[in-house]
Amino acid sequence: MKTIAIICGGDSSEHDVSMRSAAGIETFIDREKYIVYKVELTSELWEAILPDGRRSKVDRNDFSFQNENGETTRPDFCYITIHGAPGENGVLQGYFDLIGMPYSTSGVLVEALTFDKFVLNNYMRSLGVSVADSLIIRIGQENEVSDEAIIERIGLPCFVKPARGGSSFGTTKVKTPEALRPAIELALKEGEDVMVEAFMGGTEITCGCYKTRTSAHVLPITEVVTTNEFFDYDAKYNGQVEEITPARISDRLTQRVQTLTSTIYDILGCYGIIRIDYIITEGEKINLLEINTTPGMTATSFIPQQIRAAGLDIKDVMTDIIEGK
């Protein structure tokens, strides 16, 4: 039997979210086919979590560890579910490439590109994909641009968010000039660069997709409805949201969104499961919000919902990704 390591943790504010995703994936992988361990990574520790709860230090030279029987184990495949650094920005993928370890996500370039929202938006705009107008504020330069100049360029309301981060940590919907500077300061606590993005009013949807060498699946679309100011952390993880799968949009629009999702997947050269978030504005205009290359994988997350709605067995999906590389 192959040994699968579920890689979780990380150093960002999304650490706990990652641990919950790992617990979900652990239940999704077919245990009749695979031996499964969770491996928690932070800057301070690399540890495999053994079945009895004990922890075993991971050798960074080859990613091996001592299993519960005292035997040296090296995974055959790593399923990465770190949300944020270092699992979603290409760093971990580069390490695995160096040691010859197969993994579940896209490669270094795709991960780095999709992790930086500002860079991604400008790249996708160059390909003809509609995205919101935005500007970047680098750490140390936050006082070089005035509030008035930002508002004149982007308008109000607007979103202020870390350029590299997720789960809406450090994100603020800014509606007044007085709220802009505190929002920038909050976002800088999560990362070195802040993106100020124009507000788009409309219907928020999200669409999952995964492909292997032998199969391609664009999943049903989920509509995201929240009474919060936006789809923030509480909406994502504390139930303050209604998630409707399939989304209440026309068949024609559904087809357009799924085709665009598949096209973006292929243009970037993705692997494994991704999820693309969109806003549908007036005239059924499709606007890209962001691309998630290690989407949440708890039992109630979007991707498991969409897999169920597609009539697929999530165990088979996990097997496809493990065996497809």
Image: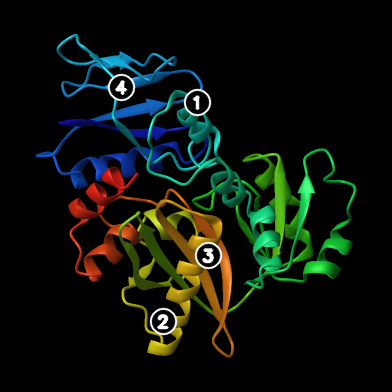
Kindly identify which residue carries mark 3. Answer: 264
- Depth order, front residue of 294/148: 294
Q: Note whether 267 is above or below 259 in the view shown.
A: above
Kindly identify which residue carries mark 4. Answer: 48
Quarter of the rendering occupied by the C terminus = top left
Circle 1: residue type:
Leu
Q: Which of marks 3 and 1 is in front?
A: 1
Kindly identify which residue carries mark 1. Answer: 98
Q: What element carries label 1?
A: helix
Circle 3 packing at 10 Å, graded few (<14), some (14-19), many (20+), is some
User: Can you give x and y, in whole percent of width and height, for residue 172 in the image?
Assistant: 62, 57
Circle 3: residue type:
Ile
Kindly identify which residue carries mark 2. Answer: 254
Closer to the chain start, of discs 2 and 3, is 2
User: Can you give x and y, in whole percent of width and height, for residue 54 in the image?
Assistant: 23, 17
Residue pictured at 44% horizontal, 36% vertical: 15
Circle 2: residue type:
Thr
Q: Note whether 91 is above or below 207 in the view shown.
A: above
Residue pictured at 65% horizontal, 39% vertical: 189
